[in-house]
Amino acid sequence: MATFRCSASAPARSSYSITLLPGDGIGPEVVDVAKNVLFVAGAKEGVELRFQEMLMGGAALEAVGVPLPDETLAAARASDGILLGAIGGYKWDTNEKHLKPETGLLDIRAGLGVFANLRPVTVFPQLVDASPLKKDIAEGVDIMVVRELTGGIYFGRPRGFGTNDNGEETGFNTEIYSVSEIDRIARVAFEVARKRGGKLCSVDKANVLEASMLWRKRVTAIASEFPDVELSHMYVDNAAMQLVRNPKQFDTIVTNNIFGDILSDEASMITGSIGMLSSASVGESGPGLFEPIHGSAPDIAGQDKANPIATILSGAILLKYGLGAENAAKRIETAVEQTLDNGFRTGDIYSHGTTLVGSPPRLGKTYVPDFKWKIHDFSALLETKATSAKSAPFDLSGYKWYLQVSPMHKKNNDETPYVALALILWPYKLEQGHTVHAVFEVSIYNHSNQMYCGCKADYNFDFKNSYSKKECLIPLQELLKSSSFLVDDSCVFGVEILKIDVSSPEKKEVVVQHKATTVQNFFVQKKGFVEGTYTWTVNNFHELELKNFFRSPTFEVGGHKWYIRMYPRGDRCSTDCLSLHLCLDASNDVPHESKNVAKMTLSIQGQKNGKHVNLTTGLVVFPGSWGWGWPNFIPLKIFKDPSEGYLVESNCIVKADLTIVGSSNDG
Ligand SMILES: NC(=O)C1=CN([C@@H]2O[C@H](COP(=O)(O)OP(=O)(O)OC[C@H]3O[C@@H](n4cnc5c(N)ncnc54)[C@H](O)[C@@H]3O)[C@@H](O)[C@H]2O)C=CC1
Ligand SMILES: CC(C)CC(=O)C(=O)O
């Protein structure tokens, strides 16, 4: 007799509503990823998923003052399935019980009547090395923990704080189970065990606790309904030990609420990380609640470190058991396996020789951007070894902006190259003392779900800080292997500027003018880059030093005439540095339709020890452009220090290396 709802038997439909409860900490990060995965898997199998995000936990406390708003419970009840991230955080740890995020979680479980919590503990062969247990112990482990979820000590009454006979403060809880509560979870567990290896181990503390004594009595009684399942009993302290000594002895475990909570966290480590364990909570009727077993992990929240697999797999069980959409679920399971096969790992499951990736929650859905930049022949861009490429400028709200892509950007302490984007504000229009605070989204187009996805960022631009921080979007290897982002060796990047605040002596607010989208194409030359080098020896620096700037003779590379401009005391954007720019000669006629894209390196040669100062950037030759360079090329103190060898007597040597890597046009 099946006593829990499994909608594999529900009538197949093609459209379902899913309630998302992102919650707190890493909850929104992992739910965002899982949502995208669910969307794509569903779409590929003709299953339309309509998502509705509701408040819960600390997020709900902040917004409406309660951890489980009535609307959230109502929306969850009315939907076909619920995907929950995690709740909780330091901020609410000392709140009164009814104002704790955890109370919201207990209330939704009770409110939905999801008394049976199924937690699969499966060691992926690819992750055996990530397990802290020896390979021969961890390999092949496949356990199902069936945890009772709406009874026991988490809900039992009386509970509270009091005073004992000595006048001392006390805290107390009640571990209580009724026969019907035990019988129904036992039946679920026997059903589950019957479909698996046919072995059920009931875990309790019947040597001490009355609630456990009743538990053992009833589980034994229910066993008579399942003669094909072999039942054993184990005390919880022994079970905790056996799980690390010999986990393969277990097939299905059934236990109460608190023991299930603790033992499944322990068991998760056999698989490598708590970030791997999904769960399904089901009741006799109504939608199921699907959630990773981990909490909100405030220690890593917002740091791009969360492992989203537990939530992604919770999404897969939602599809399979919640909606009966087996094929879409299978797609997700296969995708997880392929990701692991391809060697991608978040930090919690990282092992030597694999590729460390951040959880990609940063790739949340973004607006369709103001500025779209399509890079054709992306792999050829990598061959140029360009550290970055810059778009031609686009105009917005009275300023000139650029997008910069760095295809191999490395974060601190992380060897993984990422494709990163930065927004650049052309600084020369900014007055001293003006700061432009821009809130923006940088994104990459996902061809699979036809969405731009990326992350939100903000930056205070001023005339000395014209490049925003580089925002890592996706590991380069992941981009190269994906069919979602890279199509025909092309990918599309974007930036949407959401808000601009200018603080200046006459403080003004700028209304972001969302005009027609600007589109640019960047065609990377597949081979045969045009290259040129020019060396300029300045013989009389001390004489020229009195000028604001001076220039080299003209030289020609790639059909353009160039010269180098030096500001011996720095340009208006520099701070005690020598400024160096590469400029286009006025006689250039730059065509409107297609502009050259180049990589340039300027260097000042070390004449004593061969230690040169080199700086490299990408540039686009567009009508009206006159130069590119660095206000702070080298501090004047170092440049003029005779021991450094950059200025010898009054001589210095400047070199320009130019490579035309492609062309750009307006799309
Ligand atoms: N279902 C839920 O929403 C649960 C919520 N909580 C709440 O979460 C908060 C933190 O509790 P903790 O005891 O620290 O447990 P936790 O599960 O949030 O974190 C324990 C450890 O595991 C790591 N971890 C967890 N999930 C991870 C993931 N996906 N990827 C990589 N590492 C991960 C964390 O960084 C931390 O070091 C508390 O407020 C607690 O009440 C705890 C357990 C369950
Ligand atoms: C946060 C608690 C309410 C529950 C818990 O730890 C869990 O169910 O994993």
Image (cartoon, helix red, strand yellow):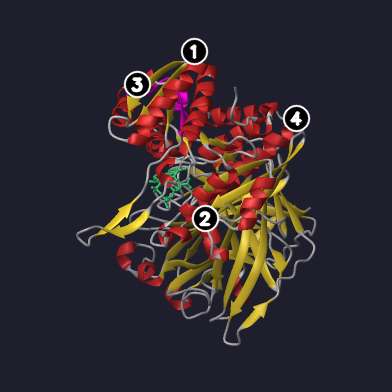
Secondary structure of the residue carrying numbered label 1: loop
Give the distance between the C-alpha atoms of the residues marked 2 and 1, in whole angstroms: 43 Å
Q: Comparing marks 3 and 4, which lies closer to the viewer?
A: 4
Q: Point out residue 62 in the picture as x, y percentages from the top left corner.
A: 53, 64
**Amino acid type assigned to the residue bearing label 2 in the image:** Gly
Read off the residue under disc 1: 227
Within 10 Å of disc 1 (Cα), the crowding (few <14, some 14-19, many 20+) is few
Q: Point out residue 520 in the picture as x, y percentages from the top left corner.
A: 74, 54
> Residue at the top extreme?
228
Give the distance between the C-alpha atoms of the residues marked 2 and 4, in whole angstroms: 33 Å
Residue at 45% in and 68% down:
539
**Amino acid type assigned to the residue bearing label 3 in the image:** Ile
Q: Quadrant of residue 7?
A: top right
Instruction: State yes or no: discs 2 and 1 in contact (Cβ < 8 Å).
Output: no
- Residue 387 in sight here: no
**Amino acid type assigned to the residue bearing label 4 in the image:** Pro
Q: Comparing marks 2 and 1, which lies closer to the viewer?
A: 1
Within 10 Å of disc 3 (Cα), the crowding (few <14, some 14-19, many 20+) is some
Read off the residue under disc 4: 11
Residues drawn in magenta: 118-147
Q: Comparing marks 1 and 4, which lies closer to the viewer?
A: 1
Residue at 38% in and 58% down:
606
Q: Quadrant of residue 266?
A: top left
Q: Is residue 129 magenta?
A: yes
Which comes sooner in the sequence, label 2 or label 4? 4
